[in-house]
């Protein structure tokens, strides 16, 4: 509702169970995170940095539907319509729960002052509260169209026309060509180990390499045998500090001259060098952990992990970046559009993953 949606994008890690008992499973990473419009450039936010977060100029190519469609094309079993229609049914109306009510209060000025948002979240001039009935009829119609006509109905035709018109009216540079040109990326998942377990995760620009780095540090301690002692808690915190400092150095490999730093990060050798700096008796100022810059806060995402009866496992992280995305809402499609300018500067920081022991999924 406020962290993800059809105007967003994300990452997915998929485990395909082995076809034979003595065979290995295959694990893939699907990158369907948004990319900037073709007309985007490195200086367009310099004079007005808030336009990287809010407004039409912050809107990137919405890639959620095309990413989910790619996963369905490769690994899906049920008809596409059967998967999308339930969401269309829910969008017709439901009771607001506490988390959405809290977010609406936090963004009360947006909901009351912007007519596109007010029509949905304050339809009678008063902010909807927990327990109130909310209707998303236009979103329901959009989802029904996608369910009945297929995922490409989002990227061309009336839905695409409406989205492009709204974004450009709000000062954005998104075009029909941008929508048609977007393609998700699929590759074998990034794999590491934590003691006797394999860990599969997504590649940069996510924090998958950072996750493996932190696990490589923490596996050197007997966290299970010794239990959650104050010392082990301190050790985990220190390992995560080094991990989050490393996260500030993660960026999109597609735009790097060299990927050596990202390739090195999840290795045991790199962890061994960093481990020498972990101290049991003290903590340190931020510069000790050698970040490139400070990320003052995160806004979160939506995450789902699931394993089916056959052992297929899916871990997916989806986002529109900031809460309520770019704050651009197309009233005709009821699509909340993500903001990408901010994430392109601060890099992505999600890591869909799960661990396996002897090929059996353990966790999402």
Image (cartoon, grey):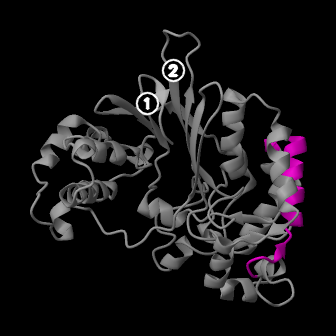
338 left or right, relative to 257: right
Residue at 46 percent of width and 23 percent of height: 359
Secondary structure at numbered mark 2: loop
Residue at 80 percent of width and 52 percent of height: 87
136 left or right, relative to 20: right
Residue 211 visible at all: yes
Whether 100 is drawn above or below 70: the answer is: below
- The region drawn magenta spans 129-152
2 left or right, relative to 88: left
Q: How far across and how far down the image is residue 47, in percent?
A: 47, 79
Q: Which mark is residue 180?
A: none
Which of pointers 2 and 1 lies earlier in the amino acid sequence? Answer: 2
Quick check: marks 2 and 1 in contact, CB under 8 Å?
yes
Whether 180 is drawn above or below 43: the answer is: above
170 left or right, relative to 347: right
Main secondary structure type of the part rendered in magenta: helix
Q: Which residue is mark 1?
A: 356
Secondary structure at numbered mark 1: strand
Mark 2 vs mark 1, CA separation in Å: 10 Å
- Considering depth in this image, is 164 or 228 the residue closer to the camera? 228
Whether 12 is drawn above or below 171: the answer is: above
Residue at 40 percent of width and 44 percent of height: 208
Q: How far across and how far down the image is residue 155, in percent?
A: 77, 49
Q: Which residue is mark 2?
A: 25
- Considering depth in this image, is 224 or 127 the residue closer to the camera? 224
């Amino acid at each position: 509702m406020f962290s993800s949606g059809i105007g967003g994008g994300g990452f997915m890690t998929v485990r395909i169970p082995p076809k034979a008992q003595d065979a290995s499973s295959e694990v893939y990473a699907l990158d369907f995170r948004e990319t900037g419009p073709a007309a985007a450039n490195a200086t367009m936010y310099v004079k007005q940095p808030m336009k990287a977060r809010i407004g039409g100029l912050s809107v990137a190519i919405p890639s959620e539907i095309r990413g989910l469609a790619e996963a369905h094309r490769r690994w899906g079993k049920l008809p596409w319509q059967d998967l999308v229609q339930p969401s269309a049914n829910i969008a017709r109306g439901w009771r607001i729960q506490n988390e959405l009510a809290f977010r609406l209060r936090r963004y009360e000025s947006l909901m009351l002052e912007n007519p596109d948002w007010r029509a949905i979240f304050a339809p009678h001039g008063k902010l909807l509260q927990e327990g109130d009935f909310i209707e998303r009829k236009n979103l329901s119609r959009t989802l029904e169209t996608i369910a009945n006509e297929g995922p490409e109905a989002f990227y061309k035709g009336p839905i695409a026309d409406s989205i492009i018109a709204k974004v450009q009216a709000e000062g954005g540079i998104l075009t029909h060509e941008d929508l048609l040109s977007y393609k998700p990326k699929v590759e074998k998942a990034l794999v590491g180990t934590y003691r006797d377990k394999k860990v599969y995760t997504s590649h940069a620009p996510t924090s998958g390499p950072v996750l493996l780095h932190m696990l490589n540090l923490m596996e050197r301690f007997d966290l299970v045998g010794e239990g959650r002692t104050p010392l082990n808690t301190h050790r985990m915190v220190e390992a995560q500090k080094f991990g989050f400092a490393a996260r500030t150095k993660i960026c999109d490999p597609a735009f790097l001259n060299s990927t050596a730093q990202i390739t090195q990060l999840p290795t045991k050798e790199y962890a061994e060098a960093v481990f020498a700096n972990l101290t049991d008796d003290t903590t340190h100022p931020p510069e000790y952990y050698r970040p490139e810059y400070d990320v003052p806060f995160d806004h979160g995402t939506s995450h789902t992990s699931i394993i089916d009866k056959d052992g297929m496992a899916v871990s997916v992280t989806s986002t529109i970046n900031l809460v309520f995305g770019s704050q651009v809402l197309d009233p005709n499609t009821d699509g909340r559009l993500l903001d990408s300018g901010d994430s392109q500067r601060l890099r992505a920081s999600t890591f869909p993953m799960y661990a396996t022991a002897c090929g059996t999924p353990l966790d999402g």
